[in-house]
Image (cartoon, coloured by chain):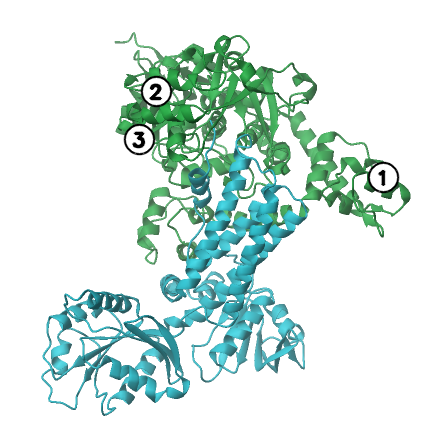
Chain colours: A cyan, B green
């Protein structure tokens, strides 16, 4: 549920492992919340507006980071609400850590585009910009949803689905007994519910721990390397990975035919996926690989299209170029050290994008590629994945809220509250878990009741 | 040509079922000249299916109807023959009254109320046409050609529109109980741009009580102390001699007969086109869908004091007559059962209520309202609730007063209507407590506190009733305050009382409220140690007890309501052009254009409209505010 008058927080700086990270907190309790985790010479609630303070973030008696904190009181702020900005030592982990402290202290993770929305609704942004504000909200939401769907670890989403199924079943059982008490009895039910709730709490707690270790999401700009077989895709991956070997982390390939590597270019995280070469084939195993490559292409934020210039373009190239026409693409004319039969002009006929002459063998063109990725990123062409940090935070927040609701249920059972109270908390847990996988409540309960339980008359 | 009858009224109500009666009474009581049409004078407020009023969440509706000044509660209090408070062992929010009615008495009592209400005319005639000029209702025309001009009209046709009743291969083109169907109005409505759809429902057989062996069934009694439905009924007046219901079960043999004859059911052969409700499935549905269940409960309920007919609850069917005999005869106690009326399925025309505003007025035709099964709901109580609201709003429109829109945070009626007009209903809609997200606040015990003020403002609740509710409210508030402040010491008398309720003795003093919150204790049982307790009516004590005991949860829901109210108060102007809001997703745009929600809250509940779409809408509305 989106409240408009509560306090929200998010990472406000561009995602990057370099430089300074900014956490922004906005809303009536922004300053009070930050006072709980800031230790410096002055209390933030006593500080003047528009002042900067040096100090430390300390949470649960643990020193987290050395920070500069900017206190901005309403109305002269971006959102026209009290706002605090915490400048920390950059770094993905640090930003996430501080954000999660802020959330534990009482803020809520901002919805996509929510700062902008508040700025507008509070009269901060010019009316003539309303149109673009609406676009920002909508596109950020679509992206957040996409992040949730595609980047959520597959195991995690299936777990959450199964938790939700368990929960809705129990609610439906209680509710059908309330609606039709003469058909369905709740005699002895609370004992069995207690066992189930405690099991769910344990499993959720485990998930929250996992989330704290930051493995919930695949991070970085989803980058797919595509091309025909033997165009030099794997070489490109090796070159990119090799150059950054020091900070490369391997993510075990989920399928045997796509390989993922996390790399950083100028501090920008990329999750690079090497795909199977695309061509018409009768080989069943290869067909599956090609299908997966096509799927990867659809989900990617950035596509690196590798063309072997020593071989003429064919139907497979046509197919690839049709698919990626309207996407963010960089074309790499590979094997530029050999005699070319394909020129930049040939590609231009189909694609309007950056084309780089490249040789994986001789490492030429690599700087140009890295610079161009950086440029795209800083121009905002690739800024979307900022959402991933906040998505991650939102997920954790939802998991914790769900856990709390289950713990309420447990308390109510132990306090011998009537059964109808259980379903109120269970429903909250169900709703919270739904946020993670992008599913709302709608008519789920009524459907479950009718499907699983035989009602009277 | 001039010999045709012409009459003029303020309001025409089409149909005198549970919705129509409430609509007509509300209008007439507000001083409007009202006429109500029925296809048969003998079918006023008829109960063509189950012989009871109330039940889980439906009992809430009746209490709310009563608190707003409707008739259903008063009528059942006068004509019930057994009564029970359901869910008494559960929380107060789900306590629900259900009373067995003497069907004939119920109908006659309502007819007499209608006939003795000023400004109200009851007329037997089939309305075949509505008259519309410039998108505004101007009157109705009956089968005989008579025209009744009016300023507002309420359609409450129930299951009668192009009705057909089916069992086996028998198809009768009648309304329920063999009454005349209304075969013409649908066409007139369609010609005025109203979209119709088709629903179905069903009813079990009625069996002659002399042919039933009750010794093979479990007898079910009413409550020892009966609680009336109406807040105006003196509880002492409803302590009557009650009749019993009986419980029995189907068995494997019953199920085998049903399975063997499924191909003869019009439901399964595809003859029935209408969508039926999942919550009251026919016995053949239950046997198919819950194949692993060895038996199903059946409730055998009397239809009245002056008839032998017994209603076989739980066994509605559209199987052929011979199969009906065979399957009923397998049930313990029904071996020699004689059927008085066959079970049947009924199909009828109704509308998707997204064509209505929350006032129950048609978006396309001003002055035309509708309520009840016509709107895609099911159940007497759901019908009466809508009829009342539609009637009140017809009156408000004529009188130039503010319409009545109840929201989800103040009543089940609000939930019912909001669901009907903002959701896509694919089956007859039945009320359920799980549909009310703020149900801890919407209890049957506080319906008067929630709604009497509204009923009074409208003009259907007397000053006297209103004054009492205000006084009651004040007494409750003062007593809650006192109970929270009242300290209880750990003296011997207190410890003894606690021990007598198996409650842990005190270490130190606590507030009286703390003790009330213990599950084994209550406001009432602590009376002996509460020396300063004022003498208060029981209904006040009950409210104090509930509010203290469940304070945590109630406070939480109150907070949620606060947020809900904020969204509800953000109105969407009538003139909005959703095509002009560029950033809306296509699905959201289509849904918003279809439903045309009145406010942001309503918009947010439409499936397919995401939170981002709502944000976009908020930004758009803000922009418009300054441009004007």
In the rendered view, tell whether residue A9 sits above or below residue B220: below
Q: Dot 3: within a 10 Å radius of its alpha carbon, few (fewer than 14), some, or many (20 or more) residues?
A: some
Front in this rendered view, residue B501 or B56: B501
Q: Residue at x 34, y 82 (%)?
A: A374
Q: Chain of mark 1?
A: B
Q: Chain of mark 3?
A: B
- Identify which residue, A446 or A142, lies in the foreground: A446
Does label 1 or label 2 sit earlier along the sequence?
Answer: 2
Residue at image position (43%, 65%) is A113
Task: Mark 3 and mark 2 in contact? Answer it, CB < 8 Å.
Answer: no
Q: Are marks 1 and 2 in contact (CB under 8 Å)?
A: no
- The residues tagged by marks 1 and 2 sit, at their Cα atoms, a distance apart of 67 Å
- Asked whether the residues under the numbered discs 1 and 3 touch, taking CB atoms below 8 Å apart as contact, a structural biologist would say no
Quarter of the rendering occupied by the N terminus of chain B: top left
Q: Quadrant of residue B293?
A: top left
Residue under pointer 3: B196
Q: Residue at x 12, y 83 (%)?
A: A343
Q: Nearer the viewer, residue B90 or B582?
A: B90
In space, the residues marked 1 and 3 are separated at their CA atoms by 64 Å
Q: Is residue A263 left or right of residue B80?
A: left
Q: CA distance from mark 3 to mark 2?
A: 19 Å
- The answer to whether residue A109 is visible is no
Q: Residues within 10 Å of mark 1 (few under 14, many from 20)?
A: some
Disc 2, SS = strand
In percent of width and height, residue A300 lies at 30, 70
- Which of pointers 1 and 3 lies earlier in the amino acid sequence? 3
Residue B371 in picture, x, y percent from top left? 43, 28
Q: Tell me the residue that label 1 is attached to.
A: B529
Q: Which residue is mark 2?
A: B140
């Amino acid at each position: 549920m989106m409240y408009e008058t509560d306090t929200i927080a998010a990472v406000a700086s561009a995602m990057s492992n370099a430089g300074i990270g900014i956490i922004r907190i906005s809303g009536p309790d922004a300053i009070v919340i930050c006072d709980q985790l800031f230790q410096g010479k002055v209390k933030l609630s006593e500080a003047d507006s528009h002042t900067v303070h040096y100090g430390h973030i300390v949470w649960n008696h643990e020193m987290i980071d050395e920070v500069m904190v900017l206190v901005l009181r309403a109305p002269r702020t971006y959102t026209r609400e009290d706002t605090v900005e915490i400048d920390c030592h950059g770094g993905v982990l640090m930003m996430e850590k501080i954000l999660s402290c802020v959330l534990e202290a009482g803020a809520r993770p901002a919805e996509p585009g929510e700062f902008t929305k508040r700025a507008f609704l509070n009269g901060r942004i010019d009316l003539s910009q309303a149109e673009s504000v609406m676009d920002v909200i909508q596109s950020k939401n679509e992206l957040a949803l996409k992040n949730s769907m595609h980047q959520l670890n597959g195991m995690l989403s299936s777990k959450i689905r199964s938790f939700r199924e368990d929960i809705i079943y129990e609610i439906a059982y209680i509710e059908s007994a309330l609606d039709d008490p003469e058909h369905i009895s709740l005699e002895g039910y609370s004992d069995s519910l207690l066992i189930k709730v405690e099991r769910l709490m344990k499993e959720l707690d485990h998930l929250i721990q996992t989330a704290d270790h930051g493995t919930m999401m695949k991070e970085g700009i989803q980058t797919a390397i595509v091309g025909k077989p033997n165009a030099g895709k794997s070489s490109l991956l090796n070159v990119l990975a090799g150059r950054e070997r020091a900070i490369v982390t391997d993510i075990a390939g989920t399928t045997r035919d796509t390989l993922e590597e996390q790399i950083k270019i100028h501090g920008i995280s990329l999750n690079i996926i090497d795909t199977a070469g695309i061509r018409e084939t009768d080989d069943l195993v290869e067909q599956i690989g090609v299908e997966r490559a096509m799927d990867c292409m659809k989900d990617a934020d950035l596509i690196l299209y590798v063309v072997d210039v020593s071989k003429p373009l064919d139907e497979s190239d046509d197919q690839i170029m049709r698919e990626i026409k309207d996407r963010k693409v960089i074309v790499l004319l590979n094997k530029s050290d050999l005699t070319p039969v394909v020129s930049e002009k040939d590609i231009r006929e189909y694609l309007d994008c950056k084309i780089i002459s490249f040789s994986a063998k001789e490492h030429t063109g690599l700087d140009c590629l890295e610079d161009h990725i950086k440029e795209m990123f800083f121009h905002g062409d690739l800024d979307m994945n900022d959402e991933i940090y906040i998505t991650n935070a939102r997920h954790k927040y939802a998991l914790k809220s769900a856990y709390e609701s289950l713990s309420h249920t447990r308390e109510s059972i132990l306090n011998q509250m009537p059964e109808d109270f259980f379903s109120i908390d269970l429903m909250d847990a169900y709703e919270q878990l739904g946020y993670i996988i992008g599913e709302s409540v709608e008519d789920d309960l009524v459907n479950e009741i009718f499907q699983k339980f035989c009602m009277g008359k | 040509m001039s010999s045709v009858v012409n009459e003029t009224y303020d309001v025409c109500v089409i149909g005198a079922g549970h919705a129509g009666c409430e609509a007509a009474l509300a209008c007439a009581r507000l001083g409007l000249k009202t006429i109500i049409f029925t296809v048969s004078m003998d079918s006023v407020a008829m109960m063509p299916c189950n012989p009871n009023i109330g039940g889980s969440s439906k009992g809430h509706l009746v209490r709310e109807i009563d608190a707003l000044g409707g008739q259903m509660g008063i009528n059942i209090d006068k004509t019930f023959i057994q009564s029970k408070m359901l869910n008494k062992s559960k929380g107060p929010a789900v306590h629900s009254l259900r009373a067995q009615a003497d069907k004939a008495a119920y109908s006659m009592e309502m007819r007499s109320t209608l006939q003795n209400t000023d400004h109200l005319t009851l007329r037997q005639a089939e309305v075949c046409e509505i008259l519309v000029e410039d998108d505004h209702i101007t009157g109705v025309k009956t089968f005989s050609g008579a025209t009744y001009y009016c300023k507002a009209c309420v359609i409450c046709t129930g299951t009668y529109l192009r009705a057909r009743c089916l069992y086996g291969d028998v198809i009768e083109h009648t309304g329920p109980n063999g009454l005349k169907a209304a075969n013409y109005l649908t066409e007139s409505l369609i010609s005025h741009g109203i979209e119709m759809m088709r629903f179905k429902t069903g009813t079990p057989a009625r069996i002659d009580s002399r042919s039933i062996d009750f010794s093979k069934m479990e007898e079910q009694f009413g409550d020892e102390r009966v609680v009336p439905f109406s807040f105006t009924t003196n509880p002492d007046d409803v302590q009557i001699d009650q009749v019993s219901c009986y419980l029995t079960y189907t068995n494997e043999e019953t199920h085998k007969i049903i399975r063997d004859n499924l191909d003869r059911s019009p439901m399964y052969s595809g003859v029935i086109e209408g969508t039926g409700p999942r919550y009251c499935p026919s016995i053949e549905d239950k046997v198919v869908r819950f194949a692993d269940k060895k038996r199903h409960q059946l409730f055998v309920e009397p239809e009245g004091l002056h008839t032998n007919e017994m209603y076989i609850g739980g066994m509605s069917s559209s199987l052929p007559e011979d199969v009906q005999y065979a399957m009923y005869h397998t049930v313990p106690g029904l071996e020699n059962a004689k059927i008085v009326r066959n079970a049947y399925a009924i199909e009828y025309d109704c509308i998707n209520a997204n064509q209505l505003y929350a006032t129950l007025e048609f978006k396309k035709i001003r002055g035309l309202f509708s309520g009840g099964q016509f709107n895609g709901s099911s159940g007497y109580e759901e019908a009466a609730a809508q009829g009342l609201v539609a009637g009140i709003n017809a009156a408000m429109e004529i009188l130039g007063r503010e319409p009545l829109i109840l929201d989800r945070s103040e009543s089940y009626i609000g939930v019912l209507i909001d669901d009907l007009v903002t959701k896509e209903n694919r089956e007859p809609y039945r009320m359920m407590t799980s549909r009310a997200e703020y149900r801890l606040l919407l209890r049957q015990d506080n319906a008067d506190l929630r709604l009497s003020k509204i009923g009074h403002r409208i003009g259907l609740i007397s000053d006297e009733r209103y004054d009492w509710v205000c006084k009651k409210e004040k007494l409750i508030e003062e007593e809650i305050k006192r109970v929270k402040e009242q300290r209880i010491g750990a003296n011997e008398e207190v410890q003894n009382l606690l021990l007598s309720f198996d409650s842990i003795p005190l270490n130190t003093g606590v507030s009286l409220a703390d003790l009330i919150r213990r599950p084994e204790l209550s406001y009432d049982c602590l009376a002996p140690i509460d020396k300063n307790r004022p003498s208060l009516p029981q209904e006040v004590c009950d409210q104090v007890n509930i509010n203290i005991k469940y304070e945590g949860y109630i406070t939480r829901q109150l907070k949620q309501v606060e947020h809900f109210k904020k969204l509800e108060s953000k109105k969407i102007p009538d003139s909005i052009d959703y095509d002009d809001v560029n950033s809306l997703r296509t699905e959201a745009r289509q849904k918003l254009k279809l439903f045309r929600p009145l406010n942001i809250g309503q918009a947010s509940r439409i499936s397919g409209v995401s939170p981002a779409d709502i944000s976009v809408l908020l930004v758009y509305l803000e922009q418009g505010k300054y441009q004007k």
